[in-house]
């Protein structure tokens, strides 16, 4: 149906809440709620039905599909203004989408709360 | 635990908002009240080569954290962008760097090269200043809280500063403690 391109993190949980899917037959950017993802296999991500794919609804979802919320490479900061380095990857629970850790400069930083995720940085609590 | 930082080292530090994780600019200059040697805040410039040289004034009360890599504020709304308000804030600022320093015996010691700020990661205060001598050596002079020598055409300091200062930020804490113990209640 398409290719999973980017993930949107809801900093309030924090968890993956939405995925951008591109390369669909319609050619328009579409997204899928993470709760509609039925499974992740070695070669494909499965959704319950094609109805799960929908156009972006709001400005934030449009920013995601336009690539303006790309997380890789963003600076990971604490709320005290100390940097870990640029984000390399994330680890999350495939079932719930719950964010588990950030991979920064080759180190795995466990995460149970985020202060903010924005266009320039990911901000972690100080402790 | 506090740390000391030279004001010039803060220039270019990115300023990030805690509500949106956005870099709104970077530190352009450190503002202080020269009468009381009190830290007032920072002016900010935009980020990038073609960005505006001055985008606003950030009062000290707006600082949520001053870390080693970024200055954190609550939101973009904390930045004073109104040109009139910025001018008013800048009006209290005297450009200290470059001012000649004389001791009270009329001997030229050098010129003011920088300020030393003390921070606990949130509050910022002026803890000292740096004199650069003609031969390039530096003397980092500690201050008592909210007091210091008066600014004029030159900064006239007591002759004793040469014995109280440190050669750099290494050793400055000891110099500051020694000064404050010796001069409790008396401005240098």
Image (cartoon, coloured by chain):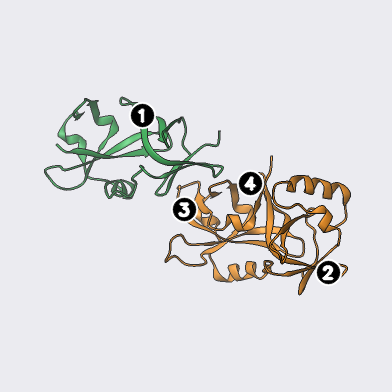
Chain colours: A green, B orange
Q: Which of these two is toward me, A80 or B140? A: B140
Is the residue at mark 2 from the same chain as the one at mark 1? no
What residue occupies the far front of the structure in this picture? B135
- Please tell me which residue is depicted at 71% across the width and 70% down the height of the picture: B99
Q: Residues within 10 Å of mark 4 (few under 14, many from 20)?
A: some
Chain hosting mark 4: B
Distance (Cα) linking label 2 and label 4: 38 Å
Residue picked out by circle 1: A92
Residue B97 falls left or right of residue A49: right
Q: Which circle's residue, 2 or 4, is located before the other in the chain? A: 2
Residue picked out by circle 4: B122
Query: Could you tell me how many numbered marks the image carries?
Result: 4
Between label 2 and label 4, give the one nearer the viewer: 2
Is the residue at mark 2 from the same chain as the one at mark 4? yes
Label annotation for residue B186: none
Residue A100 screen position, x and y as percent: 40, 28
Placement of B110 over or under A72, stated as above or below: below
Distance (Cα) linking label 2 and label 3: 46 Å
| Secondary structure found at label 1 | strand
Between label 2 and label 3, give the one nearer the viewer: 2
The quarter in which the C terminus of chain B is drawn is: bottom right
Distance (Cα) linking label 1 and label 3: 26 Å
Residue picked out by circle 2: B107
Residue B29 screen position, x and y as percent: 59, 62
Q: Which circle's residue, 2 or 3, is located before the other in the chain? A: 3
Residue picked out by circle 3: B23
| Secondary structure found at label 2 | loop
Q: Which circle's residue, 4 or 3, is located before the other in the chain? A: 3
- Please tell me which residue is depicted at 83% across the width and 69% down the height of the picture: B107
Residue B128 screen position, x and y as percent: 74, 55
| Secondary structure found at label 3 | strand
């Amino acid at each position: 149906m398409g290719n999973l391109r980017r993930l949107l993190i809801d900093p309030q949980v924090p968890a993956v809440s939405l995925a951008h899917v591109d390369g669909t037959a319609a050619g328009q950017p579409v997204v899928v709620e993470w709760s509609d993802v039925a499974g992740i296999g070695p070669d494909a991500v499965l959704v319950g039905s094609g109805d799960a794919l929908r156009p972006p609804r709001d400005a934030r979802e449009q920013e995601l599909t336009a690539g303006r919320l790309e997380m890789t490479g963003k600076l990971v900061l604490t709320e005290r203004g100390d940097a870990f380095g640029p984000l390399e990857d994330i680890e999350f629970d495939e079932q719930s989408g719950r964010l588990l850790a950030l991979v920064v400069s080759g180190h795995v930083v466990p995460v149970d709360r985020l202060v903010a995720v924005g266009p320039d940085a990911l901000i972690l609590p100080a402790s | 635990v506090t740390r000391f930082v030279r004001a010039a080292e803060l220039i270019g530090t990115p300023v990030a908002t805690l509500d949106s994780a956005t870099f709104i600019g970077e530190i352009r200059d450190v503002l202080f009240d020269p009468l009381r040697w009190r830290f007032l805040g920072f002016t900010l410039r935009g980020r990038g080569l073609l960005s505006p040289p001055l985008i606003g004034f950030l009062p000290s009360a707006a600082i949520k954290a001053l870390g080693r890599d970024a200055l954190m504020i609550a939101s973009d709304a904390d930045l004073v962008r109104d040109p009139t308000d910025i001018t008013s804030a800048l009006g209290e600022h005297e450009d200290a760097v470059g001012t000649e320093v004389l001791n009270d015996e009329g001997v030229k010691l050098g010129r003011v090269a920088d300020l030393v700020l003390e921070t606990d990661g949130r509050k910022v205060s002026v803890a000292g200043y740096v004199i650069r001598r003609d031969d390039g050596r530096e003397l980092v002079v500690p201050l008592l809280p909210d007091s210091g020598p008066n600014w004029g055409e030159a900064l006239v300091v007591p002759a004793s500063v040469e014995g109280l200062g440190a050669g750099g930020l290494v050793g400055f804490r000891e110099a500051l403690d020694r000064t404050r113990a010796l001069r409790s209640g008396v401005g240098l």
